[in-house]
Image (cartoon, rainbow, N blue to C red):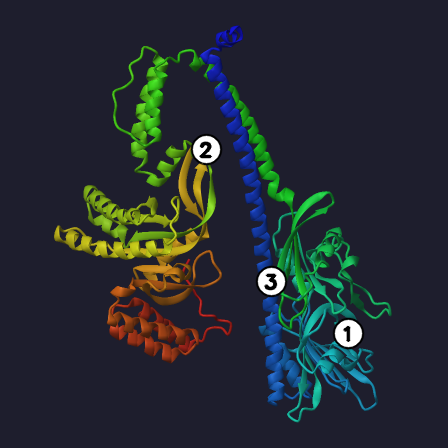
Amino acid sequence: MDSKSKELRFKVTFRTTLFALLLGVLLTSLISLGISGYIYARFAVSNLGDQVLDQTAARIDQHIQHALDTAEDEAETIAGLFKNSWLDPEDHESVTEYFLEALKARPFLSYLSFGSPTGKYYHGFRDRSGKLTTLWLVPKESGNNRLLEFLIAENDEREVIRDIPKSIRIVPYERPYYLTTRDAGKAIWTESYVFQGSGELLDVPGVSRAIPIYSKAQEFQGVLTADFDLHALSRFLREVDLGSGGLCFLVEITSEDSARIIAHPDAADPDRNRRIDLTKAAPDGNGRITLAADQIADPRVASILPVIEKGLNTGDRSSRKFNLLVKNQNHLGEIHHLGRKGGPNWIICMMLPESELFGDVQRMARLMALIGLGGVLITAVLSLLLSKSISATLRSLAIETLEVGQFRLKNKEPVLTRIVEIETLANALEEMKTGLRSFQKYVPSDLVRQLLETGKEAELGGERKELTVYFSDIVGFTSISEQLSSKQLSELLSDYLEEMSGEVLRSGGTVDKYIGDSIMAFWGAPQPCHEHAKQACLTALANRARLKELRDAWEGIGLPPLHARIGLHTGFVMVGNFGSPDRLDYTAIGDAVNLASRLEGLNRIYGTEILISESTLQPVRDQFVTRALDKVAVKGREQGIMIHELVAQREHIKGSETEWIKNYETGLKHYFARHWPAAIDSFQAALEVNQMDKASQVMVERCSKFSSHQPPKDWDGVYFAPK
């Protein structure tokens, strides 16, 4: 009993309790937020590093694939000319003239050559400076081979730079590429080897697309090659930006499962003192040969070779990320196999120092620690001061605060107290309620409710989610605004934004922001929406119909009619709180947002009202009628995407609209197939059904232009929208 009394008599002051509580909560929050923020920042930066490596691999892959495609296409073209007797393989003068023209048109190619079983050989060659030469190696009755080499001047005049009556140049039928192609009996890609360059030397490393040539009687006539030297790839890799300490290089896996470095940025270093060599002198002293990978003078290359040996040299298209330690420094790495069927067995290797990614994170962590420490000191002082004047009236304030947490924001009589600080707190609480009531009008109500129900303060950061993003804009709003007074303009715009936003909110969407007369909204955050693409499409159609009703009403009172353009795109974005610690904006950012905005702007080109992307169309294809409109590359994108006009819900479509869409989409198929007359006929048929269809007019004009000026051979139907 005495012990219990002693325990009850042990008291602490309210000031001490409040001070300890505030300080403990603050420290715990700061530590938790600091650790989680640091972890998240590292994760985000690591993810950024992965994206950088992936994008770099894709860029290099695309460049190499294009080079290989160029060589294959040109080799097949010349082989066809030989096969159909449009070029005579024995007429070395005419064929080398063709080779030169082909090299001018194909900047990726370095060599075009032909060698016959008789020892006859000739080629067209572009050296590293861009100069063109031709070379003929012609057997003579005396048994000697005469070598003639010409420099091609800018006026296409030939200048003899070498005439060797008794050449020691290796005849083609003794070269490995020739023997391998002849024995294979089909087109092949050679492994990297050193070409015979100018004169008699083996000094140009490269690869060849080699094709055996047969006469119509199936007699073997020789081997044709289309080649490109690997120094050009080294120059390209030097232009790839992976930071000051990053590295990307190209590895070839030979038929003997050995690795060779065939392209490296330092192999193209303008400074000869820092340039590394990917070849070495041949043992017989005749020119040079390629080096094995482990002989390259770059320690970073040696560190990545064991990763390659762990199974990526299968020939399949694949990628693999890894971490490795080079010179006591951690690196993020990726190896990416081209996986080209029938192509060379090449692997793109990349590595990026972690320090270049995480340096800012570590500096920010130190800064946050200092700011947090300052906050702790300030809070400790304020806690001591505030705790002196707190009284029993805190309970009534706590009850009212609880009501605020439950989002009950009714006006109440202010708390009466003689303590100035508590009176201030009570007034502040009432002002907070007023502010929250206004706050609901500026940010999504669902977000406000979440923040207040959880009791957490809004903080910087977001999450990656798939949303459907909505952009709308009034057509010709600038000219309309010039016709109205300020009051009329304000009332008209207010009515428009209220009606359009109301439909977004009723369908479960979030109105992100107003940008003048434009509306940005999305579905899927902060509240989940499993059918966000469907809800966005329904809202766009509803707003189009509602705006038509409003136009009729506005015209009745003398106001100008408003027309709107809408763009919808579904994709992954970062959504959350962005801005500064003092000013946050709950919004979505990312490429998907930009693309939705671009789609809205594309309406003006095609005279449409609602454009959606392929990713928005896929989940709602069975519920809505759309028109495949065009394949467009918008600003900020090199690749084209299919865009579609949202016409109506499937149950509301009219027969004439079905015919109009069918004619247009038939024309679009002819357009992509380069059948210009057929495309024009189909688009004209669409115009007969819908005379106001600007998109059909645009496509007719485009097809007419292409009929007289054919697009390039590599044209894939993509229309590059004006910047």
Residue 46, compared with residue 379, is above or below; it is: below
| Residue ID for mark 3 | 61
Q: The residue tagged with tag 2: helix, strand or loop?
A: loop
- Marks 1 & 3, CB-CB < 8 Å contact: no
Where residue 137 appears, as percent x and y from the top left, is: 75, 82
**Residue at the (33%, 16%) spot, across then down:** 423
Q: Distance of mark 2 from mark 3, alpha carbons?
A: 41 Å
Q: Nearer the viewer, mark 1 or mark 2?
A: 2
Q: Which quadrant would residue 302 be assigned to in this image?
A: bottom right
Q: Residue furthest bottom?
A: 217
User: Residue 530 appears at what percent x and percent y?
Assistant: 39, 52
- Between the C-alphas of marks 1 and 2, the distance is 69 Å
Whether residue 66 is situated above or below residue 574 in the rendered picture: below
Dot 3: element: helix
Tell which residue pokes out farthest to the left in this image. Answer: 556
Number of residues whose C-alpha sits closer than 10 Å to that of mark 1, classed few (under 14), some (14–19) or many (20 or more):
some
Q: Earlier in the sequence, mark 1 or mark 3?
A: 3
Badge 3 amino acid: Asp
Can you say which quadrant of the picture contains the C terminus? bottom left
Is residue 375 at all visible to an observer of this figure? no
In the image, 67: left or right of 660? right
Decide which of tag 1 and tag 2 comes sooner along the chain. Answer: 1
To which residue does mark 2 refer?
581
- On the question of residue 39 being in view, the answer is yes
Q: Earlier in the sequence, mark 2 or mark 3?
A: 3
Q: Tell me the kind of residue under disc 2.
A: Pro
Label drawn at residue 199: 1
Q: Would you place residue 34 above or below residue 334 in this image? A: above
Count of numbered circles on the image: 3
User: Residue 49 location in percent, x, y?
Assistant: 59, 48
Residues at marks 1 and 3, CA–CA distance in whole angstroms = 34 Å
